[in-house]
């Protein structure tokens, strides 16, 4: 996993599909590791270091907020000061290291691990706010020591982040650290610290606290510690974390406990923080140990009778075998006495030692993973919930719901999600967010869990409204990292949450909350804040945010603020696209000053911002960029490196907005710099240069002659080299730019320059050439390719096709097919050679080679027909027929596809082998369960049934019908659709009776998908063979008292009337009694399907004189409007709306009038819903249908124009 991740860090542009594919291959199981932290880059992993801010009050509730805006800004300044001090220290260290000068370092306060003699050291000067009693020394080890005489020299401001100083005699000593011998200060006798004391041996002999050893000081690591009794390590050592102070000097009380003894300590040890897998393993071991432990005397007494047995004593001569202790301790070992060196079988802790059951006491609760115990641990405690205070009870309720959402089954999750949403206001924002947000910060979170928790936040936000204001910053800390996630759907979810948060909290709260992060010293925080602000702008409107952005972008106090403000504008342009056009002038004006900013980073981000604005505004808005053209033009002559790349990108996106004349002029001017940068070794610069060349060349005013003379030679010399094909980041950009150049200068001009490279030794380079040629010929055709170039092209393509060694064959296959189809009849001289290559590769031992060859046949079959190579096609058909015994399903699918292509172009009669021999060979292949085989086989059978059914016996077609029934179970919709259509073709060929009999029997199966597909097939047979051939048998089948069969018949009728349309007028009277019965059936599904059938009949017979039958059916549909099932209501409403079309709004209005003012609300709602639909559909048609009302003096209800007409 680490190797994969390291590789991905080196090439971070292809973080999506390639990374996931490599994970699948690496894990071997085909499953993707869904743990988010495992696939994140170091930069993305910084989200785990962000802290949830303390709760803040709502500034709009007229109460004093818990943390005021001023306090937040002051803490922000403090963090900036800390960052500057850290940076200064690092810089000084670097200077001292490089220049050899000693860095004057101020001595820190005395620590418990410092030498006792350093207590009289130089006092602190200018103590910083960071100095504190609990300060921790920074891990710098590069500090050089100083002489005491230099203590009066300039001293750095002390901070708790400084390194503990080392005091020695000389000024130029070797760099030391605390693991070396403790140096003695000049003129002071060395007193041993507790790190230098000899560890007491097993006999308790050690150095007395007050003594100074005369020999070389010993470290506690020099001697093997003796084993201690369990009693001596059972409690936490007093007086400090490691030892106790005796007479002002720290002494080590005993050896560090190890092995099993350490597990009994009260001090936290590694077992408390073990990995989930380790915890699971220990659980299993504990259980096995529990089952296999020796029986105790008490248990034996309970098992055996009290009399009849005697407990024997061991013989007096029995002595257990023990290895002499001197042998065990001959070599020093970290383990205690009496333990085998270098290996110890650890005693498995019993289950009781964990005191943690696997699941909460409530049996309905899901399993709690070991890593989740810190969040859901309270659920494992046995408590009486009724006795708990209200706060704790609410906390447990939320915890249970979140556990069900995170780890529960889908039904549990659905119920818990609904409950937590409905009770959001009752639980309160504080309780909810304090439990949800830490879960989202968990380092072991998985994709699905994150998705569910984000969904919870989304729904809770909707319910809480402005109650979320005090928690806006907390939510942002958790959600902002989603905006830079590599998963597209995670980014969309993040935008959705922040958008809803902005709408709930309001612009003022969002600005007040996010303002301190704009100039945060941490670049990660500034980046995510800029993206979040862009989402806020999209939610609340760009104009609302522009005054704030103007102030931020022109901040004189902090360059970070200016940088972030301009980045917000850039992100708004990327996120909203053309929606920035109304505000383009303002957005350019508030960022343009950044092009001449003193900070290089600000200048770079300004240029990138302008390029994003220009890209979003294309092809409009050149007027807005007038003011920035001069500084951009000046910048590309002054800058180098990344700054130049950004300025070039900005100009590259602005040029396409210009008029043709200006675009031509600016392109010529900027091209000199671009051509100079062609040879830049910087990959980022190459990427941007290619993009700018593509943009400039595609502009209307640029002349092809100029491109041909000035750009092409240098472009091909610098970019069309083997190394570019190996660089995944620039490979695609080179191809796209070359295609754009070809669009300007013509196909042959570009193809002639790269065609010889199709025979290059490097396969990746050949693939790059092939992909370019394919795209160029696809866009421009092969009309301007002369005979010489045509020969070179075919020769190169065949060579590249034959010399493939890698598994990725799609590029070569697609390129070959495109070239052959583009040349068309000009391919005739080369076809024998091409077909020879295909036949040779069809016999290759590699399955992928055979599959590629078969796929190529299906791509060039049309050209073979155009070149009148029927004999060649027939020969290929026979070859493919012989390969139908292929064992690899992917290859077999391609062979069937090639056969289908040949059958399509050569025709049924000329096909070799004959259709009557081919089809029986295909019937058993229909049993193959591979989707590619099924799809190609059923397509081929359907094509034969459509065009050459008479060449095959009816019995064979019936056999195929039975095989097709099984294909109706296929997961892929295309296979089911092809099967259903094939039923229609077969019925047309052999008559509907036999096929219909097979299909009607299939209505009795239990599987719903098969019944639905069968009904569609029956409807298609009815459409193909006329409804009168099917309808009698179908109506007769309805008499069977089986719900599945009757529902199937109704669905088949529904599809049939949908397909036959106006032909339905001939059958409406015959079918009316059956529909009348089904609309009164007790089964809801009957009535629902019958309503759908009525809808299709009504829409098919509009204006054909069947209104009496439709009115009769409407009377049976109408009572179903008051059903409670949503599906039935929906079907009824659709039937009524179809009746509005067929009978007219006026007729339906007479029904609706009866219930518009009904006393029952549920009745009124249904009638008003229908009335609204009628009003939208035919407002004018309702005018004569309204009842006649008398004028009331205020309103005039008479329809005089209608009365005149009458």
Image (tube, rainbow, N blue to C red):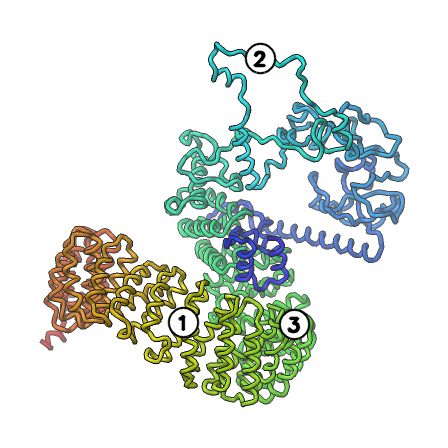
Whichever of labels 1 and 2 marks the residue nearer the N terminus, that label is 2
Local SS, label 2: loop
Quadrant of the image occupied by residue 13: bottom right
> Is 689 placed left or right of 408 in the picture?
right
Front position among marks 1 and 2: 1
User: In front: mark 3 or mark 2?
Assistant: 2
Mark 3 surroundings: few (<14), some (14-19) or many (≥20) residues within 10 A: few
Residue 1139: which numbered mark, if any? Answer: none
**Res 864 visible:** yes
User: Mark 3 and 1 residues: CB-CB less than 8 Å, in contact?
Assistant: no
Q: CA distance from mark 3 to mark 1?
A: 44 Å
Quadrant housing the C terminus = bottom left
Rendered view: 114 above or below 1110: above
Residue under numbered circle 2: 312
Q: Which mark is residue 881?
A: 1
First in sequence: mark 3 or mark 2?
A: 2
Residue 356: image location, x then y, percent: 51, 33
Q: Which residue is mark 3?
A: 723
Q: Position of residue 610 (x, y in %)?
A: 57, 72
388 and 243: which is toward the camera: 243
- Residue 1115 location (% of width, % of height): 12, 60
């Amino acid at each position: 996993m680490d190797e994969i991740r390291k590789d991905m860090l080196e090439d971070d542009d292809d973080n999506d599909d390639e990374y996931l594919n490599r994970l699948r291959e690496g894990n071997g199981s085909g499953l993707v590791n869904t743990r988010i932290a495992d696939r994140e880059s170091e930069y993305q992993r910084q989200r785990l270091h962000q802290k949830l801010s303390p709760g803040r009050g709502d500034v709009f509730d007229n109460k004093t907020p818990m943390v005021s805006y001023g306090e937040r800004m002051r803490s922000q300044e403090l963090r900036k000061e800390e960052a500057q001090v850290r940076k200064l220290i690092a810089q000084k260290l670097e200077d001292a290291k490089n220049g050899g000068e000693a860095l004057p370092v101020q001595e820190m306060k005395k620590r418990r691990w410092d030498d006792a003699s350093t207590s009289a050291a130089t006092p602190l000067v200018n103590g910083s706010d960071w100095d504190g009693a609990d300060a921790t020394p920074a891990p710098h080890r590069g500090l050089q020591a100083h002489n005491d005489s230099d203590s009066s020299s300039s001293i750095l401001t002390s901070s708790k982040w400084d390194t503990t100083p080392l005091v020695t005699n000389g000024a130029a000593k070797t760099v030391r650290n605390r693991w070396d011998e403790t140096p003695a200060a000049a003129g002071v006798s060395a007193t041993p610290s507790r790190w230098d004391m000899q560890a007491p041996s097993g006999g308790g002999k050690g150095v007395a606290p007050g003594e100074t050893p005369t020999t070389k000081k010993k470290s506690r690591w020099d001697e093997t510690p003796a084993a201690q009794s369990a009693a001596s390590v059972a409690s936490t050592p007093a007086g400090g974390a490691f030892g106790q102070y005796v007479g002002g000097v720290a002494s080590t009380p005993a050896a560090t406990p190890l092995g099993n003894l350490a597990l009994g300590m009260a001090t936290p040890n590694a077992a408390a923080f073990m990995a989930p897998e380790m915890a699971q393993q220990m659980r299993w071991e504990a259980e096995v140990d529990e089952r296999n432990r020796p029986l105790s005397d008490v248990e034996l007494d309970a098992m055996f009778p009290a009399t009849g047995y005697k407990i024997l004593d061991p013989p007096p001569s029995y002595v257990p075998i023990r290895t002499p202790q001197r042998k065990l301790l001959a070599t020093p070992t970290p383990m205690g006495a009496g333990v085998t060196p270098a290996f110890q079988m650890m005693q498995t802790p019993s289950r009781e030692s964990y005191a943690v059951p696997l699941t909460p006491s409530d049996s309905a609760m899901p399993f709690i993973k070991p890593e989740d115990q810190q969040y859901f641990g309270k659920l494992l405690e046995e408590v009486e919930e009724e006795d708990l205070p209200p706060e704790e009870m609410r906390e447990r309720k939320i915890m249970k719901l979140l556990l069900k959402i995170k780890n529960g089954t889908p039904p549990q999750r659905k119920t818990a999600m609904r409950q937590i949403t409905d009770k959001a206001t009752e639980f309160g924002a504080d309780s909810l967010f304090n439990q949800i947000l830490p879960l989202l910060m968990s380092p072991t979170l998985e994709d699905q869990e994150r998705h569910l928790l984000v969904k919870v936040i989304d729904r809770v936000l909707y319910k809480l409204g402005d109650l979320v204001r005090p928690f806006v910053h907390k939510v942002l800390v958790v959600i902002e990292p989603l905006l830079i996630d590599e998963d597209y759907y995670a980014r969309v979810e993040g935008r959705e949450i922040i958008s809803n948060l902005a709408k709930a909290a309001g612009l003022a709260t969002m600005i007040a909350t996010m303002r301190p992060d704009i100039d945060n010293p941490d670049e990660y925080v500034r980046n995510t804040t800029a993206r979040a602000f862009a989402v806020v702008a999209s939610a609340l409107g760009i104009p609302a945010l522009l005054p704030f952005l103007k102030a931020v972008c022109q901040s004189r106090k902090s360059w970070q603020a200016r940088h972030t403000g301009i980045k917000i504008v850039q992100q708004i342009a990327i996120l909203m696209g053309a929606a920035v056009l109304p505000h383009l002038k303002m957005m350019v004006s508030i960022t343009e000053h950044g092009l001449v900013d003193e900070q290089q980073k600000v200048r770079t981000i300004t240029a990138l911002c302008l390029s994003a604005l220009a890209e979003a505004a294309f092809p409009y808005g050149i007027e807005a960029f007038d003011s920035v053209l001069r500084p951009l033009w000046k910048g590309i002559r002054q800058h180098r490196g990344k700054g130049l790349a950004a300025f070039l990108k900005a100009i590259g996106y602005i040029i396409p907005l210009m008029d043709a004349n200006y675009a031509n002029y600016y392109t010529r001017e900027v091209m000199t710099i671009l051509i100079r940068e062609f040879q830049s070794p910087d990959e980022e610069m190459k990427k941007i240069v290619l993009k700018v060349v593509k943009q400039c060349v595609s502009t209307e005013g640029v002349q092809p002659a100029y491109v041909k003379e000035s750009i092409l030679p240098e472009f091909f010399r610098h970019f069309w080299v083997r190394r570019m094909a190996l660089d995944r980041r620039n490979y695609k950009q080179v191809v796209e730019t070359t295609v754009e150049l070809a669009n300007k200068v013509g196909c042959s001009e570009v193809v002639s320059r790269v065609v010889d490279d199709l025979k290059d030794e490097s396969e990746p380079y050949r693939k790059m050439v092939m992909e370019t040629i394919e795209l160029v010929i696809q866009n421009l055709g092969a009309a301007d390719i002369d005979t010489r170039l045509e020969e070179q092209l075919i020769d190169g393509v065949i060579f590249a096709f034959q010399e493939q060694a890698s598994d990725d064959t799609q590029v070569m296959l697609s390129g070959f097919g495109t070239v052959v189809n583009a040349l068309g009849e000009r391919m005739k001289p080369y076809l024998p050679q091409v077909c020879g290559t295909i036949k040779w590769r069809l016999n290759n031992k590699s399955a992928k080679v055979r599959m590629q060859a078969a796929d190529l046949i299906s791509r060039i079959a049309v050209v073979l027909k155009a070149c009148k190579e029927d004999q060649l096609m027939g020969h290929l058909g026979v070859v493919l027929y012989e390969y139908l015994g292929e064992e690899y399903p992917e290859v077999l699918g391609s062979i069937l596809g090639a056969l289908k292509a040949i059958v399509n172009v050569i025709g049924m009669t000329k096909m070799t082998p004959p259709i009557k021999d081919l089809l029986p060979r295909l019937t058993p292949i229909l049993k193959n369960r591979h989707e590619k085989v099924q799809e190609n086989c059923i397509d081929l059978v359907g094509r034969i049934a459509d065009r050459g059914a008479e060449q095959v016996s009816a019995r064979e077609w019936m056999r195929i019908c039975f095989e097709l029934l099984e294909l109706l179970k296929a997961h892929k919709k295309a296979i089911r659709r092809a099967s259903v259509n094939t039923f229609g073709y077969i019925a047309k060929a052999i008559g509907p009776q036999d096929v219909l009999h097979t299909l009607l029997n299939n209505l009795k199966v239990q599987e719903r998908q098969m019944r639905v597909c069968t009904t569609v097939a029956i409807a298609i047979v009815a459409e193909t063979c006329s409804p009168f051939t099917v309808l009698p048998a179908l109506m007769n089948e309805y008499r069977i008292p089986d719900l599945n069969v009757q529902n199937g018949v109704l669905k088949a009728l529904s599809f049939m009337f949908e397909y036959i349309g106006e032909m339905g007028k001939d059958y409406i009277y015959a079918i009316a009694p059956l529909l009348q019965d089904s609309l009164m059936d007790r089964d809801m599904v009957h009535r629902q399907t019958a309503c759908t059938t009525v809808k299709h009949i009504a829409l098919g017979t509009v204006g054909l004189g069947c209104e009496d039958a439709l009115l009769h059916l409407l009377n049976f549909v109408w009572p179903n409007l008051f059903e409670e099932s949503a599906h039935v209501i929906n079907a009824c409403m659709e039937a009524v709306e179809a009746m509005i079309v067929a009978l007219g709004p006026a007729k339906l209005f007479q029904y609706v009038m009866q219930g518009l003012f009904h006393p029952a609300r549920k009745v009124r709602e249904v009638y008003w819903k229908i009335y609204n639909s009628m009003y939208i559909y035919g407002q004018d048609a309702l005018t004569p249908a309204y009842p006649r009302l008398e004028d009331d003096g205020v309103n005039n209800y008479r329809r005089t124009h209608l009365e005149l007409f009458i």
